[in-house]
Amino acid sequence: AEAETPEQCDIDCETARESDRHARYVFRQRGRVLRTHRAFGIAAWSTMLVTEALGTILAINQDTWFGRGACQTNPGAFGCYQNSLITGMHLGFAFASTTLYTTAGVIAATAPDPEGASEGDDAAPRTLRRHKWLAWVHGAGMVILPILGIVSTHPQIFGINDEESRADFTRATRSIHLITGYATFAALTWAGVLEL
């Protein structure tokens, strides 16, 4: 029996060392992936901030549920003469923030989680669960926002062609787009604060 114990220990010790090396590798890999996710998340948040600012200028100048639009009452208001430029910039930043956001999401989904980091009642797992819940909220917003943006500028997609119906439909979808944008940005900001 004494001769078997060292041999058994050698096998168990080697298995334990290999398991320990693998665990260290997985945790290092998780750290690298999450740092990359964080960088793309900050970039997505930054471009979305600019998108929101440009969208707010457009909403102030155009007809929404919140008002008839500054350009109708004062054609010299800020952004009225540059409306197409601001619209183009808004579209460009929206595309950039969507691309960066999607990249951050894919990177987060590939992060290894061998220990079930969101399980437990400690502060870190609770924070991670909130972060994941908020990801569902801002993720839904990031899907809905481009659809609303396209629909509000092209109501003919739904066969709405007469002038009055187009105006009402565009006012409604533009307003919903604005509200969804603010809600999505708030959820993304809150998730970012939890992450940091």
Image (spheres, rainbow, N blue to C red):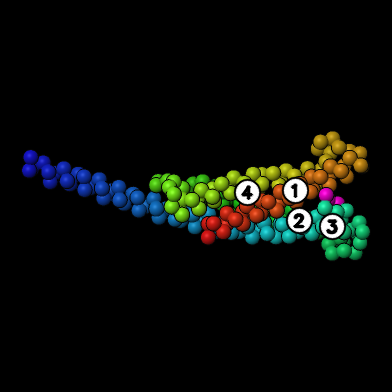
C-alpha distance separating marks 1 and 3: 15 Å
Density class for disc 4 (Cα within 10 Å; few <14, some 14-19, many ≥20) is many
C-alpha distance separating marks 3 and 2: 10 Å
Residue type of the residue flagged with mark 3: Asn
> Image point 66% across, 54% down: which residue?
185
Please name the residue that numbered disc 2 is placed on: 55
Please state if 87 lies on the left or on the right of 119 as rendered: right
C-alpha distance separating marks 4 and 3: 26 Å
- State if disc 4 and disc 2 touch (CB < 8 Å): no
Instruction: Return the x and y of residue 102 as percentages of the image width and height.
Output: 60, 48
Label located before the other in sequence (2 or 4): 2
| Numbered disc 3: secondary structure | helix
Residue type of the residue flagged with mark 2: Gly
Residue type of the residue flagged with mark 1: His
- State if disc 2 and disc 3 touch (CB < 8 Å): no
Type of secondary structure dominating the magenta stretch: loop
| Numbered disc 4: secondary structure | helix
